[in-house]
Amino acid sequence: MPYKPDQFHISENADRLFLECAENIVEYARQCVKEHGSFSMALAGGSTPKQLYLQLSTSPLLEQMPWASCQFYFGDERMVAHDHTDSNYAMAKQALFERAPVAAENIHPMPTDCTQAADCAAKYQRQITDATPFDLVLLGMGPDGHTASLFPDTDILTENKKSVAAVYVDKLAAWRISLTFACINRSKRVIVLTQGKGKKDIIQEILYGDTPQQYPITGIRPAGLLSWYLDKDALPQHANNEAP
C-alpha cells in the first residue's frame, strides 16, 4: 500500500521550515483551545525539533501560543536521568519550557527512574490515559526510517494494544520508551518534521520506492490529519509541492 501524507509542506530553507511549522502549530493550538478548551501535544526529541521549539518560544509566536491551556507530553525517551544530555525532556526543557510560560503541572515527561524500562512504560501509559487521543503528535525521522523509538526490526512495531511500550534497540544497545503506533494513530493530527540533504534518499524510498513498508515511519497512519514538513534540501528530485 503506497504511503501518502495528507499534506506535504515544503519550505525554501530550514529557517523557513521551522517558522512555518511553528506558525501552523500555534494556529492549530489556538483552534483546539477555542473548540474544547485545551491543547495536548506529544513532543519529539532530536536536533530538528529543538529548532522548532526555539522558534515557538521566540517572539512573536511566544506571545501567540495559548501556553496556559497547553499540556505537553513526549513521544519517546531514553532511559537516562531527566538532566542527562541525552534526555529528550532535558532538550525540551532547555529549548522550550525554560523560555516559555509553561506551568510545571502542564509538563508530563516520561518516567525513567524505574529499574525496568517496561515499568516506566506502564507508568506513563497510566499517566496519559485521560489525555489521549492527543491533539497533536510531533515526529521526526531517522536515516533508517524510524520515528519516535519505533526502530526497524523491533518488537514494539507489532504492539497493537498498549499506548506506551519499552523497546530494546540492538544497534544502540539501549532500552527506550515510546508511544506505539496504536497510540500515535489515534491522534487528531500528526506532523512529521524533517530537513536536510541527509534525509533525501530515505524520503525518496518511503514516498516512491518499491518497498516503503520496511520503514517504520510508514506505520504512521493517523485517524486524523498527517502532515509532512520538509525543506527543499530534503525533497526528492521528482517531487513537488503536492503530496506524492
Image: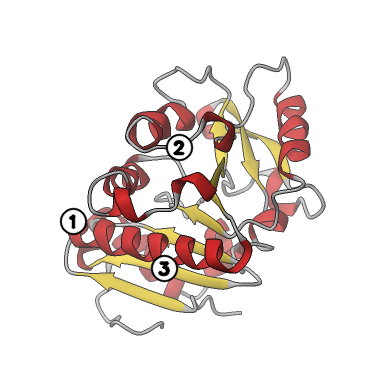
159 vs 234, left or right, is right
Q: Distance between the residues labelled 3 and 1?
A: 16 Å
Mark 2 or 1: in front is 2
Residue denoted by label 1: 15
Task: From this view, report whether residue 42 is shown above or below residue 239.
Answer: above
Which marked residue is nearer to the observer: mark 2 or mark 3?
2
Badge 3 is on which residue?
Answer: 228
In the picture as drawn, the residue positioned furthest to the right comes out as 161
- Residue 33 appears at what percent x and percent y? 54, 61
**Distance CA(mark 2)–CA(mark 1):** 24 Å
Q: Tell me what residue is drawn at x 25 percent, y 45 percent.
A: 58
Report x, y in % for residue 147. 51, 51
**Is residue 208 at least partly visible in the picture?**
no
- Which is more foreground, mark 3 or mark 1? 1
Residue that badge 2 annotates: 102
Task: Looking at the image, tell me whether mark 3 or mark 1 is earlier in sequence order.
Answer: 1
Mark 2–mark 3 distance (CA, rounded to whole Å) = 26 Å
Q: In this view, does 240 lie above or below 200?
A: below
Q: What element carries label 2?
A: loop
- The amino acid sitting under disc 3 is Trp
Crowd band around label 3 with a 10 angstrom C-alpha radius: few (<14), some (14–19), many (20+): many
Residue 45 sits in quarter:
top left
